[in-house]
Amino acid sequence: MQSMIRRKYNLTYAKLSAIGFFAIIFIGAVLLSLPISSKSGEVTPFINALFTATSATGVTGLVVYDTYSYFSVFGQSVILVLIKIGGLGFMIIATMFLLILKKKIGIRERNFLKESVNTIHIGGVVRLAKHILVGTLLLEGIGAIILAIKFSSEMGVKEGIFNGIFHSVSAFNNAGFDLMGRYEEYSSLIRYSDDALVNITIMTLIVIGGIGFLVWEDIYKNKAKFKKYHLHSKIVLLATMVLIFSAAIGFYVLERNNLFADMGIKETILASLFQAITPRTAGFNTIDTAELSEGSKLLTMILMFIGGSSGSTAGGIKTTTFIITILSVVSLVRHSNDLNIFGRRLEDSILKRAYSIITIYITSAFIGMLFISFIQPELALSNTAFEVLSAMGTVGLSTGITRQLNALSRLMVIILMFCGRLGSLAVLMAVAESKNNISTKKPLEKIVIG
Amino acid sequence: MQSMIRRKYNLTYAKLSAIGFFAIIFIGAVLLSLPISSKSGEVTPFINALFTATSATGVTGLVVYDTYSYFSVFGQSVILVLIKIGGLGFMIIATMFLLILKKKIGIRERNFLKESVNTIHIGGVVRLAKHILVGTLLLEGIGAIILAIKFSSEMGVKEGIFNGIFHSVSAFNNAGFDLMGRYEEYSSLIRYSDDALVNITIMTLIVIGGIGFLVWEDIYKNKAKFKKYHLHSKIVLLATMVLIFSAAIGFYVLERNNLFADMGIKETILASLFQAITPRTAGFNTIDTAELSEGSKLLTMILMFIGGSSGSTAGGIKTTTFIITILSVVSLVRHSNDLNIFGRRLEDSILKRAYSIITIYITSAFIGMLFISFIQPELALSNTAFEVLSAMGTVGLSTGITRQLNALSRLMVIILMFCGRLGSLAVLMAVAESKNNISTKKPLEKIVIG
Ligand SMILES: [K+]
Ligand SMILES: [K+]
């Protein structure tokens, strides 16, 4: 009985957050379509305004217009506000949603409910939201100051401050929007590929923004005492480190004779690291995505698929899900029943959740790719796949086909960005009818797989 | 104690079948490299002979030479024998292996052990092998007669009979090798795209060969009494039907204005069905794979990834694994703990096995793609992905890049074909060290995913 009430509540909750996001996107799209939002004073076609608003609120970063060249300062400010609402709102909503999901899982294993509640006090949701708000502003502020100093020397103080704030917020929320069209349209941060200050500031903002609130709380509380961290934080930090450094080495190997051929050591190291960090959700780029070797494109797609961490603005299947798949294979090969990591055992039910997420994710990706390939057969499959994974992973990297998409394809990308932000699972739960699952157990029978 | 002995036995068993296959491939490669095997009388480079032998024994069908134009009748016969040994040997080995795996799963749930043993009597392995042998010869024989009559009218009786046998065996074992180079090199069955007799014969052989022995046994025993079938057979038949017809509709939609534009209704229906059946393991084609639209290429790749049924010569993750992933999502959305289908509940442990297979499969595919992209950056990613999935799925379709692969890439494809045939899981189990898994349970802790 209690569980049924809670389920109804979850459903309503998921629906509410979906509707809330949609409302913000819609208002943003209306504002962006007004003449005041474009530099030229023209009315922006609604589908493109919707695309931009979804991309900004969903902190994706895919663009059909160059943000600097097309939008007025008013339009750019609308985008900035949408990123801030999208990023912050999502972090708060996601954190609360995760707490509820934790509770729900706990229903079946009442023993763990207490533990789950202890992890973060559900009573203190307001305090939690405050923490996120203050922490976010603090980190964005530091980033904005560093970047503003740098940019002021290039474009004057007023422009420099606006650009500093814009890029810091965009980086921290992993939005990937940039205003570098002033130098070259759609060039993102290519101009700064050799600039250690900009690179390190942006990378740091991306990584901190992408590891998620649950981890910040742990670092804030336990400082360097890694052993005291929650298992969730340990896994996220491990996965983040491993993915960044192995991907950086991978990109170095794959681009050594291609894009990195003419670079010095410093630029090569910066570019390898940046390229490893950006695909898991950020969407900035310091090298031309379209010019990447085929291997690097694949590696980027794999990283976009994996994504960032739960409770952050990142998309993808998430690092924890990724680690669980590896653990499940290890445990099977070892003929063990348990998923063990850092001396702890994960609950069995997490495996089904992890793999369901992956299944829904892959299925959605294939539907998106098939749809766009059907609508626009002229687009190369690898570019379409890249675009779809970028949209779903709220990454925002593109091989450049975003502007070639027609209205129907743009609509599909809008839907993918929306679903990618809310999480495919949450969308499915919001849409799914509440079913009565109090049924008798069916007789068990074995089948053969593999 | 008993379980440890059995595990040791499994390991040895998996290793033995891997070594056995390797030995057959090696002997085949030596024979194919001899001057007598080539039409021109030249010595074939060993890497290419190894490629051909692996492709034949593994019933994959990828070729670096046109089988008809390059190989002598002796060479063609070696290929035919390798297909026959590979297909038959694998069916017997796979069936026995599956029985053992069933037993192994049963170790943990002793209750089900009896049921598992009842499914097929392990004592009667010899009788089982005989069944497979006789059934295989009978079906291949019928196919050979039909095709021989057809081909005799085109190429004379002697050639017609050889071609009838070759193509029937190749189709039934899902090998995908053909001798149509006599008309045009690498043309497969494109010539017969409008020929109902050839299409239906080949398609029937492919489908029957691809559903696996466990299902044949059920159909043979229970005839039309579908309700009496084992759950495994029901799932395989359901998945096969659904995949064939939905894929046929998909290809029709995607190729309507492309390859099917100039075709009549009959040819369109035949080509849609053939294109839907062939990627899940067969590897013949009646339309030019390289000319497929991008959407059709993606759909083909998805089907190659899913593959055929356990206990058949098919590759891929297998239809049962595919169905289990869908069931797990359904059960999660319904907030149910159980995987129910056809009024039965699947054991929980099957979920981990299913998803581990998928994880290993996807990981291997990505490694293969990254490797080839690194070695040959000039190859388009979509073609590389197609080739890798074709090799792992023992499908044999290609967009035509097989012959562009250099020695290192060919070696990678050989490894992928070999692993695809034995099953990534089996390979892993064969390689894995036997670990002592009698360890204390770790304390449980929750993490957040998704
Ligand atoms: K982004
Ligand atoms: K094949």
Image (cartoon, coloured by chain):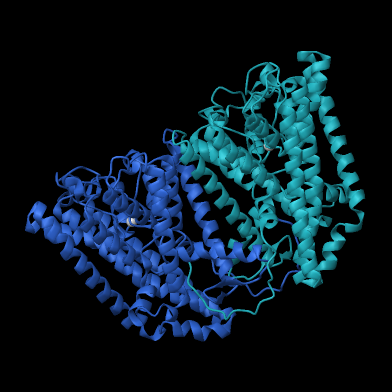
Chain colours: A blue, B cyan
Q: Quadrant of residue B321?
A: bottom right
Query: Could you tell me which residue is drawn at 38 percent across and 68 percent down?
Result: A17
Can you give x and y, in whole percent of width and height, for residue A19 in the image?
A: 38, 64
Location of residue A295 with respect to A18 vertically, above or below: above
Image spot of residue A92 (x, y percent): 34, 72
Residue B245 point in image, percent of width and height? 65, 41
The residue lying toward the viewer, choosing from B51 and A390, is B51
Q: Is residue B234 visible?
A: no
- Residue B85 in view in this figure: yes
Give A291 or A313, whichever is nearer the viewer. Answer: A291
* Ligand 2 lies in quarter: top right
Residue A382 position within the rendered picture, expressed as x and y whole percent measured from the top left? 44, 40
* Residue in the picture at 7% in, 58% down: A157
Instruction: Report whether B33 appears left or right of A326.
Output: right
Picture layout, residue B194 above or below residue A10: above
How many labels sit on residues? 0
Position of A439 relative to B408 (above/below): below
Q: Is residue B385 left or right of residue A15?
A: right
Horizontally, residue A299 falls left or right of residue A271, namely right
Q: Nearer the viewer, residue B74 or A69?
A: B74
At x 70%, y 17%, the residue is: B41
Tell me: B52 left or right of B131.
left
Give the position of the N terminus of chain B as an image quadrant.
Answer: bottom right
Name which residue lies at 79% across and 14% down. Answer: B153
Q: Quadrant of residue B314?
A: top right
